[in-house]
Amino acid sequence: MDWLYMGGTLLRELRTNRVRRILSILGVVIGTAAVISSLAVVEGGREQLRLHLEKMGINMVLLEDRYRPEPVRLFQDVYETEQRQAAAIEDAQPDEIEKKIILKSRASPGAAAGQDPSGDGIPMPEVLRMRDVEALRARLPEAALIEPVAMDYAEVGLTGTRPRVALVEGGTALGAVIRNLAVREGRYLIPSDTERSEQVCVLGSRIAEEIFKGAPAVGRRLSMLGSQWRVVGVLQPKGTMMRFDYDRLIQVPITSMHERRGIEMVSALLVQARDNDGALALRDRLHHEVMARLRDRDPEEIRVFCQQELIEQHATMLRTFRILTISVAAFSLLVSGVGIMNIMLVAVRERTREIGIWKAVGATDADVMAHFLSESVLTCAIGGTLGILLGVLLASEAAGFVASTVAETSGWSPVFLPVFFGLSLGTSVAVGLVSGLFPALVAARLEPTEALRHE
Amino acid sequence: MRVELSGIGKTYRLSETVEVPALRDIDLRVREGEFVALVGPSGCGKTTLLSILGLLTLPSAGSYRLEDREAAGFSRNEMARCRASTIGFIFQAYNLLPREPAWRNVMFPLTFRAETRATRRQRALEALEAVGLAHRANHRPAQMSGGEQQRVAVARALVNRPKLLLADEPTGNLDSRTGRDVLDMIVDLAGRFGTSVITATHDPRVAARAGRVVEMSDGAIVSDGAGT
C-alpha cells in the first residue's frame, strides 16, 4: 500500500463534511486542553513548592499566637482592608482609602502612641515573653534555632507626610538567615541592635519604594510607633511566603518594639528542626511546651504549623485539582470518542461503494482498516493540536484560579514540559484509535460484492 | 491467462431455511487472450459468475483454477492480492472514486505494487493517454461525460496489465457510438497485453465482437459457442 497516495486520499476526505467533523472534535479539543493545562498547572504548582522550599527549608516550624493586643488589632483591620481594596480596585481613588484609614486610626485615641492595652479594661491574657523563649531553647534541644517574632501594625511615614499603615515585625539578626532574606542595600539587623534595643529598621523592597519614591532609604528616618527609626537596610524582593508579603514588611529589633509598645509579647516563634524528619515531632513538642507555659490560653489560639504540613496541603490541593481536571478530560474525551465513532460509522456507510471499489482493485482488509483508522486518528490529532493551543492559552488563567480559590497564594505560572505536549497529543491519538477501531473493522469486513451494490 | 471453472455453484442464504441458488454446476474454460461474452436475461447469474471469476466472492462449491492455482480456497487476503496483481474490472456504473482526479483513479490499483511513485504515476498517465484522455488527467469524475468516465475506468482496469479483464455491461450506460469506442479500446488494449476478457452483456454488438458467446439462464450455462 502506498501511504503517500492514501495520505492524499485522506486529506481529500478530511476536507469533506467539515462542519460535522469540527463538531465531532470539539470534545477532543476540550479534553486535550484540560489534559495539558492540568499537567502544566500541577507542574507549576510543584515548581512553586520547590521555590518555596528553597526560601524556607522543609525543617521549619512556625508557632503563632493569634491574640493581638487592642492597638495591633485595630491597625491589622485597617491594614487588611487596605490590602483588599488595593487588590480589588486598583484604579480607585487612593485618597479615599487613606482618608478612611486615617479616620479609623483617629477613632482610637492613644493607639498610635503605644499605650498599654490593659488600659482599656480588658485584662491581657498570658503571652510568651522573651524569657520563655530562653526556657524553650533549653527545653527543646532538637530545635536548632528558636527565634522570637513580634507582629505589629503601625502607622509609618516620613515626618510631615501622611502616614500609612504597615506591617511591622520585631525580630532578631537570625530572622534573615532562617527565612533566607537577602539585603539589597545597607545591612540587616545585627545582634547588637537587639541587645541595645536600637531604633533601627529594615524595609521590604516595595514599602521602601512607596515611602521613599526611589530615593535612597538607608540612613533616612521614619516615624513609627511614636518615635523616629533609622533605616539601616532594604531587602531584595522576596514575594509571599507562608501568606506573608515580605516586600511590604518593616523589620525592627524585637526588643526595641517591645520597649516602644510597652508590651512584651512574642507573637510568633520561628523554629528550625535539626533535621527534616524531626519537624513534625518538634511541632507537637513545641505546642505542648508552649501550652505548659500559657496554661489559661485556648490551645486553638496558639497555632503551630510546619512547612511539611503546608507542603502536604499544597500537594493535596494539587492532587484534587488534577483529579478534577482529569475527570473533566476523561469525560469529554469519552463523549467525543463516541461522537467520533458515530461520524466514522456514517463515513463508512456513505463510502461503502468506494470501499467496494477499493477492494475490487486490490485493497486488502488491512488496507481499508488502516485507512479508516488513520482518518479517525488524524481527525482526533487535529482536535488534539487545537486543544493543546487552547490549553496553553488557558493554563495561566487556570493556575490563577486554582491559586486564588484553593491555595490562597498569589498564584503561579503554569510550567510546560516538552513531554506534556507528547502526552496530550498521545491522548487524542489514543481516542482516535479506540473510537476508530470499530468503524474501521466494519469497513474492513465489508463484502466487496455487497459494497459495490450499495447505493 | 487460463481460467478453469468446474462444478462451480453459488448459493445465497437469505435466512436459516431459505437458500437461493444463483449458480449451478458451472464448467467454463477460458484460454489466454480469449474474448468471452456472457449473455442471458437479467438475474441469470452473469454478475455472480463475474464476481467469482474476479475473486470478489468465493463459490459455494466447485473448483476455480487460475493458471496453476486453486482459487476456490483463497483467504480474503489472497483474494485481494490476486485481484491487485492479475485482475482488472470494468463496471456498468464506471465506479470511479468521486473525489479523486482521473490520473489518481487510474493509479489506484498500482498503489498496491512495489514500484516507485514516479513509475506508477508515469504508467497511470500512459494508460490515460492510451484511452485518449491525457488532457483530462486532473479532472474529477463529475467533470467528465459518461463515455470519458468509462474510458478512465478502462485505463484503470488495464493499468496493471491484468491477465484477466472482467467487464460487467461495460457499454450499458453509454450511447451506441460511445459504447463502440469504449469496446474498441477494450479489445485493442486487451489484445496488446494478451489479456483474457470476460464480459457480461445485453448488447448484441458486444457479443458480436466476442470470439465466443456463453449463454446463461437461471444460474446455468445453456450454450457455449462462437459469436453470432
Image (cartoon, coloured by chain):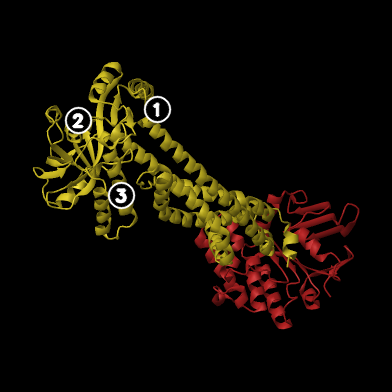
Chain colours: A yellow, B red
What's the mark number on residue A172? Answer: 2
The quadrant where residue B42 appears: bottom right
Question: Of helix, strand and loop, which one carries label 2?
Answer: loop
The quadrant where residue A229 appears: top left
Of residue A294 and residue A346, the one placed in the foreground of this image is A294
Structural crowding at the residue carrying mark 3, measured as other residues with C-alpha within 10 Å and reported as few (<14), some (14–19) or many (≥20): few
Residue A356 in sight: yes
- Relative to B187, say whether B27 is above or below: above
Question: Of helix, strand and loop, which one carries label 1?
Answer: helix
Mark 3 belongs to which amino acid? Gln
Residue A289 as seen in the image, left or right of residue B21? left
Of residue B145 and residue A26, the one placed in the foreground of this image is A26
Q: Chain of mark 2?
A: A
- Relative to A168, say whether B198 is above or below: below
Mark 1 belongs to which amino acid? Pro
Q: Residue at x 52, y 58 (%)?
A: A4
Residue A336 as seen in the image, left or right of residue A286? right
